[in-house]
Amino acid sequence: MNMVLFLRKNLGGLISKQNSSLCKYNVSLPLLLRNLSASPEREVVTPGAVHHVLVNKHDFSPEIASAVSSALSRFRSLQNADSILSLLEEKRFSSSQLQRIVTIYPEILAARADAVRHKIKILRDFGFSAEEIAKIMSCSNAIQHSSAEKKIIPQLATLKGMLGSNDEVIGLVKRSVWYMTVDLEKIFLPNVDFLRSCGVTTEGIRVFLHNYPRCLLLKPDLMRKAVERATEMGVDQRSKTFVHAVRAIASRSKQSLELKMQGFRDMGVSESEILVMFRRAPTAFCISLDKMKEIKSLLLATGRYEMCDLISDPSTFMCSVEKRYKPRLQVLEMLESKGLIEKWPALSSICRWTDKRFVEKFVRPYSDELGEVCGAFKGSKKSKK
């Protein structure tokens, strides 16, 4: 500190004598003195010190602690980083959630504790539970990176104005935390207004929000192109499938959609039939080409169904091969081989019936004959499409 006082005393005279020289190099005396005073007090934070705190105090795995220690050592205050982690632990963040936050957003350890506490309080006062807050903040750096006053509070207010209740907003943010970070005024609201102008009902908008929340965060020009393409393919804007058609188009590139259409052409489906299929079940065009081919081969191999059955009901391409088709086809084949049924059910029945209904119709009445197949089928969980 004596050196600093010496410099303070003598630099004044020096700068008066050589003012032109210092100005030439753009030297700021107050800034120079401030840096000189601060330098001796700068905390030296080593990767080893960071690693020790993360592992021994906050239960980080040694591997993750090692991976982030070098990056975190650039922060001036290890004490501040420690206090941030302690605050999050106090707010019921689990060890795994803390490790994820530090991994995706290490800058949080340089944040002010009161700022982090304020953001958590805003979310808690809005109705998010401690567990929900921890999950949201640990899956994305959206909340940590956003300003409380300029971003978080206005976003929540806008979403509530749109959805009508805090609970609806909480559900939406849980499905897509991006609603807390994008510019709603420039992206979300214009998309909603445009869809409404096309005849999409409030219920249709809710389908987007509940099932395809990211779709409404597309750039408005991409949304318009998806709507135009769906209309060109003959989907009625007032139909219930219109929302699904827009999503099917908007969620993939033009080339990807064309590949799916080519996949159907390769199966022998005509252009007109492809358009009919899209209008009936646009989400069928979101499945992989491999799954399309597997389902076609599996169903046609039974000798009970033809390609026209799949074309007339394209939702058959959306069912699970392992959880729905294979166990049900096995039951039907066994029943037929034992002469217990003369006719197989329609393909739409195999596709849409719940496990409970299928069991009541084709399994329970023949439980003795089916034996192990029956037991395995009844023990399976409810299949999903």
Image: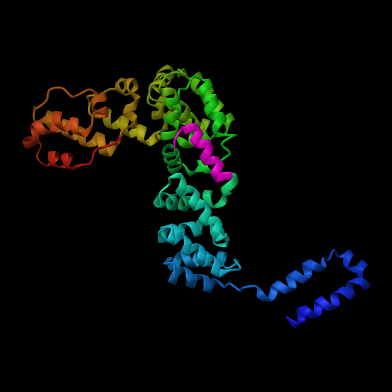
The residue shown at (56%, 51%) is 145
Q: Which of 256 and 210 lies nearest the eye of the viewer?
A: 210
Is residue 203 shown above or below 137? above
Q: Describe the colour scheme in one phrase.
A: rainbow
In the image, taking residue 286 as reference, residue 357 lies left or right, namely left
Q: Nearer the viewer, residue 360 or 60?
A: 60
Q: Can I make out residue 31 in this image?
A: yes
Q: Is residue 153 magenta?
A: yes
Q: Which residues are magenta?
A: 151-165
Residue 251 in sight in this render: no
Residue 11 lies, in percent from the top left, at: 85, 75
The quadrant holding residue 219 is top right
Q: Is residue 19 left or right of residue 251?
A: right
Q: Quadrant of the C terminus?
A: top left
Residue 247 magenta-drawn?
no
Residue 262 image point, x, y percent: 45, 27
Q: Residue at x 51, y 67 (%)?
A: 82
Residue 228 picture quarter: top right
- Name the chief secondary structure element in magenta: helix
260 relative to 96, above or below: above
Q: Is residue 339 left or right of residue 324?
A: left
Residue appearing at x 58%, y 62% in the figure? 110
Q: Residue furthest front?
A: 125
Question: Which image quadrant: the N terminus?
Answer: bottom right
Q: Nearer the viewer, residue 23 or 104?
A: 23
Measured as percent of width and height from the top left, residue 370 is found at 10, 36
Q: Count all numbered tags in the image, as a single digit.
A: 0
Where residue 6 sits: x, y (%)? 80, 80
